[in-house]
Image (cartoon, coloured by chain):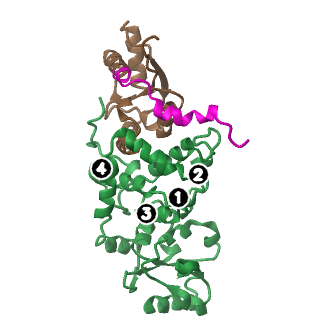
């Protein structure tokens, strides 16, 4: 952390950046996001295993952009989000400074997005054994059980959209869920609205989700909604050969391969 | 009580399947009348939300059909659609929405007979499965429950 703080102080004092987006001590022992604009405050930066929020979400927010050029403290999940956002032309290389950070708090400096991409090659985006187990458990249920499981699970949702706010990929200024001509998703936090909201969220994140679990961590009800996007990830890897965010190829659903499987099409 | 007649909604593309279905008619081929056809510019233009809307409105089965690969009027709309359906089918299945009720097919403008066959087999299969009440029950609150006072 020492070298991260040193670099952050350097960047601020040389006015190379105007704000450092990082983690700091929050209430109840939980870290929160910090937007550090003075060199003296750099000491407040922290990093530990509890820093699970995806800070990349702030890169596209107008309120943060207003502060000036940011430097962002970036563990692997943030780096992935940066690559995906860069691919979607939401951020430019010249707009941000990326302060990569390893789990043991070492600074990794990046000169370009391409450097981040090659760094990420050592961290393949794959589901771990526990995640796979949960997916297999749900997939192993009968159709009726799965329907019951999800209606039950999603009945907790009261549509606060914290999952959307916490997601670095949900940056649309106008979200389809708020469209009312036509009304795609019923407004009330009723089964139908909940179900359709979560289906839409998962579909719109297919091949874009960086599997950072920020949505799940932000959910006040602790709904397993991240398993919908995890399923999309598993399916994309298995059936469409998706490997993770990249600067080179198109988004999963905005490109195609003429040889994609079609065993379900008559 | 009379036998259950499934309601089938077909989302088809303008250039191939819609023309194919037209050919079925002009060729005087008879097929099940359970199907309501909705015409789209392209399969690539069919939003996955429309399937949910159809189920919510009481459809028992859905047919999605468009141009064969490499035949798309817009070059690649059907390729994009195919990818989307690969992902969406997986998600529907995972959430317990019955994918046996959704039939995907390629029907060209020359395949009037194939269209009749697709409709007939889909109607038979869905008739076998019975009415799709799971989704409808969830969607019915719009009519049966008073929300927001």
CB under 8 Å between callouts 2 and 3? no
From the viewer's side, name the closer residue of B115 and A257: B115
Do the residues at pointers 2 and 3 share their chain? yes
Dot 1 or dot 2: first in sequence order is 1
Mark 3–mark 4 Cα distance, whole angstroms, equals 18 Å
Q: Chain A appears in which tint?
A: green
Residue A251 lies in the magenta-colored region: no
Dot 1 or dot 3: first in sequence order is 3
Mark 1–mark 3 Cα distance, whole angstroms, equals 12 Å
Q: Please give the label number shown on residue B83.
A: none
Residue wearing tag 1 = A170
Where residue B91 sits, quadrant-wise, is top left
Q: Write down the region rendered in magenta.
A: B125-149
Chain under label 3?
A: A
Mark 4–mark 1 Cα distance, whole angstroms, equals 23 Å
Secondary structure at numbered mark 4: helix
Looking at the image, which residue is at 30% across and 54% down? Answer: A237
The quarter of the rendered structure image containing the C terminus of chain B is top right
Residue wearing tag 3 = A84
Q: Is residue A76 above or below residue B59?
A: below
Label 2: how many Cα within 10 Å (few below 14, some 14–19, many 20+): few
Output the letter for the chain in brown.
Answer: B
Dot 3 or dot 4: first in sequence order is 3
Do the residues at pointers 4 and 1 share their chain? yes
Residue wearing tag 2 = A175
> Where does residue A216 sit, x and y in percent of width and height?
47, 62
CB under 8 Å between callouts 4 and 1? no
Secondary structure at numbered mark 1: loop
């Amino acid at each position: 952390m020492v070298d991260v703080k040193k670099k952050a102080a350097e960047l601020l004092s040389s006015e190379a950046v105007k704000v450092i987006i990082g983690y700091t001590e929050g209430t109840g022992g939980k870290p929160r996001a910090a937007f550090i604009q003075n060199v003296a405050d750099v000491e407040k930066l922290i990093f530990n295993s509890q820093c699970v929020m995806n800070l990349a979400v702030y890169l596209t927010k107008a309120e943060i952009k207003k502060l000036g050029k940011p430097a962002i403290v970036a563990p692997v999940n943030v780096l992935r989000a940066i690559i995906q956002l860069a691919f979607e032309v939401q951020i430019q290389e010249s707009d941000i400074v990326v302060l990569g950070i390893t789990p043991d708090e070492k600074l990794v400096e990046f000169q370009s997005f391409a450097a981040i991409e090659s760094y990420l090659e050592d961290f393949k985006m794959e589901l771990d054994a526990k995640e796979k187990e949960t997916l297999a458990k749900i997939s192993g249920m009968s159709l009726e059980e799965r329907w019951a499981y999800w209606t039950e699970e999603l009945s907790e949702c009261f549509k606060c959209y914290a999952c959307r706010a916490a997601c670095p990929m949900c940056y649309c200024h106008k979200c389809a869920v708020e469209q009312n001509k036509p009304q795609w998703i019923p407004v009330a936090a009723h089964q139908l609205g909940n179900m359709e909201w979560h289906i839409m969220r998962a579909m719109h994140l297919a091949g874009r989700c960086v599997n950072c679990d920020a949505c799940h961590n932000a959910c006040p009800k602790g709904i397993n909604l991240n398993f919908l996007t995890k399923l999309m990830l598993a399916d994309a890897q298995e059936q469409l050969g998706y490997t993770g965010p990249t600067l080179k190829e198109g988004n999963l659903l905005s490109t195609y391969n003429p040889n994609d499987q079609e065993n379900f099409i008559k | 009580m009379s036998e259950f007649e499934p309601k089938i909604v077909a989302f088809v593309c303008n250039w191939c399947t819609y023309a194919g279905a037209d050919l079925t008619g002009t060729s005087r081929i008879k097929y099940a009348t359970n199907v309501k056809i909705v015409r789209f510019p392209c399969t690539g233009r069919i939003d996955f939300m429309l399937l949910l809307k159809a189920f919510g409105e009481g459809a028992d089965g859905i047919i999605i059909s468009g141009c064969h690969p490499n035949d798309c009027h817009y070059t690649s709309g059907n390729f994009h659609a195919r990818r989307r359906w690969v992902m969406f089918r997986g998600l529907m299945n995972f959430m317990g929405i019955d994918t046996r009720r959704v039939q995907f097919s390629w029907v060209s403008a020359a395949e009037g007979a194939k269209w009749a066959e697709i409709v007939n087999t889909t109607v038979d299969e869905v008739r076998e499965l019975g009415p799709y009440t799971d989704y409808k029950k969830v969607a019915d609150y719009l009519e049966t429950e008073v929300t927001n006072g």
